Amino acid sequence: MNDAGAFGFADFVPENDAVGVLGVARYIGDEFAALLYEFRAQIADYLQSLTKTNMRTLADLIAFNTAHCPQELVYYDQDVFLLAEQFVGYPNDPNYIAARSHATSTARAGIDNAVRSQNLDAIVAPHLTNSTGPAVAGYPNFSMPVGVRSSGRPAGMLMYSTAFHEAQLIAMAYDLEQALHPRQQPQFLNAITPIPNAGGYPGSPFFKITIAGTDRTLAATADRELVVLPAFTGAPEQLWRIDELADGTYRVMPKAVPNSKEPLALSAVGSSMPTLARFNPDSDRQRWNLKTP
C-alpha cells in the first residue's frame, strides 16, 4: 500500500481490540436494543408511505408472515420482528436514549482513540468483518473491491476513519484502485442447460439457469428484478437467450419479462453478482464469461 500514493499507506494496520471484535462487544447489546426501538417505529413510517399494500405496521407484517408461513418463512424465521414489536417508546423512552447514546459514544471513542494513538490515516479490515463500528459511530466507511479469490468470488476491504474524512478516504481508495486494477470481467457461476422444445432463435435454443447443484432457477419479474424460484417450470420468464459476442464473451437476456416489452439483459453488480438492467450493447457489465466447471 505504501507504493500507492502520498497518503501514508504505511499507517494502515489491522484492527486492534479498540475497534475490533472486543471493542464491538462493549456496545453491541445497546446497539441492538436501539435498533429494535428504531425499526419498529421506522418500518411503520415507511409502510405508511406506500399505496399498493394494506400493511401499515410491524404487527401487520408479523401477521402476514404467520398467515403465509410456508411461503414467507422458508429460510428465516421472524424472531427479530417479534422482538422489535415489544420495544415501544421511540424516540423518547429513557432506555432507548441511554442505549443509543452509549453505543454511539463507545463506537466513536474506539475509532477516535485508535486513529489518534497510532497516528493512523485510516483503519482497514477485510470485507464483511467489522462494518459495525463505523456504522454505529456514524463515521464514513468505504467498501472497495481488491481482487478475485481463487474460487472466483470477489474479495473486498473496508477502509474507515473518524468524522468528516470522506474526501481523504475516497482519495486513498482511488490511489489503491489504480495500483491494484481489481476490476475483472464478470463470470456467471451458475449452471446453464439448454431446454428442448422451448422455441429458440437462429442457431440456438433457450436455456434455463440454475444455482449450481440445486433446482433453484433464475427468472425475470414484472418489476424488472432478477429472482430465484424453487424450481424450473418452463415459464417464458425462466428461459434465457445466450448470444456469443465477437470478443468471446456472452450476452444473457430473458426470453420474456411479464407485462413488459422493454429489452433487458443480465448486468453485473461488482464482479459476478447479476441483476437485470435495460439492454445496452455497449455495456461491459452485460458481457459475461461462461466457463465449463
Image (cartoon, helix red, strand yellow):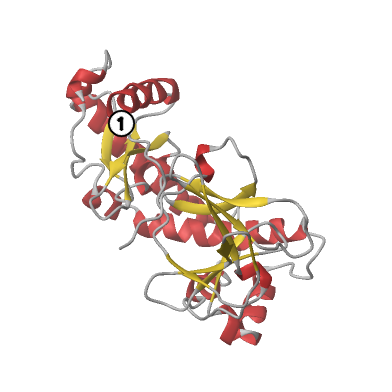
Residue 170 rendering spot, x and y as whole percentages: 41, 25
Q: Residue at x 74, y 67 (%)?
A: 56
Which residue does the image show at 19% across and 24% down from the upper left? 11
* Residue farthest top in this picture: 6
Q: Is residue 171 left or right of residue 44?
A: left
Residue 122 appears in the picture as rendered: yes
The residue located at (29%, 28%) in the rendering is 122
| Residue 252 placement, left or right of 290 | right
**Front residue of 266 and 240:** 240
Amino acid found under the numbered disc labelled 1: Asp
Residue 160 on image: x %, y %: 35, 34
Task: Report which residue position mark 1 lands on.
Answer: 112
Counting labels gives 1
Quadrant housing the C terminus: bottom left
Asked which secondary structure carries label 1, the reply is helix
Give the percent coordinates (x, y) of residue 31. 42, 54
Residue sitting nearer the eye, 33 or 163:
163
Quadrant where the image shows the N terminus: top left
